[in-house]
């Protein structure tokens, strides 16, 4: 993972993380069948990372340019706090989410992969991208994951945030100890 100066301090303040979908939570491939989008592949590790963030009171949301029943189902499984689909310009949805949760930009992280994510990577307190993001996004992001989209990049970024907030070791401890962990779904 590559981080720019100041990313660690900003990560300590994060209360909400917003994700793009295609190329970020998925590998960016769009699988089409005769009736339209047939499937999306998601990383179980990314899902576990989101569930662990929820355990630490970090909210999660999606803003995506495409609309998909598959994404609605996945968002429900992960118990995301907000889902905005079909957003060509993602800035309006970002502002709605910010107001809904009464947050400031510096309390929000955004994870994307392509040039349509640039406005939110620049506006959010912590702009992040997956390892196979386009060069323009990598240049602007404060955190660049090693892993590609749909292959654990989201988990890598969430671990970074949780470690900077000092919450990671206690989360791992709930799995290595005898204490049960409720509500953690991948």
Image: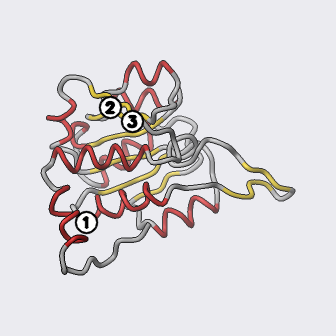
Q: Nearer the viewer, mark 2 or mark 3?
A: 3
Q: Which residue matches tag 2?
A: 143
Q: Nearer the viewer, mark 3 or mark 1?
A: 3
Q: Quadrant of residue 176?
A: bottom left
Q: Residues within 10 Å of mark 2 (few under 14, many from 20)?
A: many
Residue 50: x percent and y percent? 36, 58
Q: Which residue matches tag 3?
A: 145
Q: Is residue 30 above or below residue 52?
A: above
Q: Is residue 177 above or below residue 51?
A: below
The number of numbered discs placed on residues in the rendered structure image is 3
Q: Residues within 10 Å of mark 3 (few under 14, many from 20)?
A: many
The residues bearing labels 3 and 1 have C-alpha atoms spaced at a distance of 22 Å
Looking at the picture, tell me which residue is in the foreground, 104 or 133. 133
Judge left or right: residue 126 versus residue 88: left
Name the secondary structure under disc 1: helix
Q: Which mark is residue 55?
A: 1
The residues bearing labels 2 and 1 have C-alpha atoms spaced at a distance of 22 Å
Residue drawn at 36 percent across, 34 percent down = 128
Residue drawn at 27 percent across, 54 percent down = 101
Looking at the picture, tell me which residue is in the foreground, 146 or 165. 146
Residue drawn at 19 percent across, 80 percent down = 178
Name the secondary structure under disc 2: strand
Residue 103: x percent and y percent? 23, 47
Who comes first in sequence, dot 2 or dot 1?
1
Looking at the picture, tell me which residue is in the foreground, 42 or 85. 42
Q: Are marks 2 and 1 in contact (CB under 8 Å)?
A: no
Q: Are marks 2 and 3 in contact (CB under 8 Å)?
A: yes
Judge left or right: residue 12 versus residue 83: left
């Amino acid at each position: 993972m590559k981080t720019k100066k100041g990313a660690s301090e900003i990560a300590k303040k994060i209360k909400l993380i917003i994700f793009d979908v295609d190329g970020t939570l998925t590998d960016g491939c769009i699988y089409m069948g005769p009736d339209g989008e047939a499937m999306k592949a998601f990383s179980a590790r990314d899902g576990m990372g989101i569930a662990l963030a929820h355990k630490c009171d970090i909210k999660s949301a999606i803003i995506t340019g495409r609309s998909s029943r598959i994404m609605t189902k996945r968002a429900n499984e992960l118990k995301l706090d907000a889902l905005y689909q079909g957003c060509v310009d993602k800035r309006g949805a970002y502002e709605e989410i910010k107001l809904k949760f009464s947050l400031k930009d510096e309390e929000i992280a955004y994870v994307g992969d392509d040039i349509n994510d640039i406005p939110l990577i620049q506006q959010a307190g912590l702009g992040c991208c997956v390892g196979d993001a386009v060069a323009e996004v990598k240049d602007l992001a404060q955190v660049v994951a090693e892993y590609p989209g749909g292959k654990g990049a989201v988990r890598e970024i969430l671990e970074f945030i949780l470690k900077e907030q000092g919450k990671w070791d206690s989360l791992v401890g709930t799995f290595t100890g005898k204490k049960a962990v409720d509500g953690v779904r991948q």
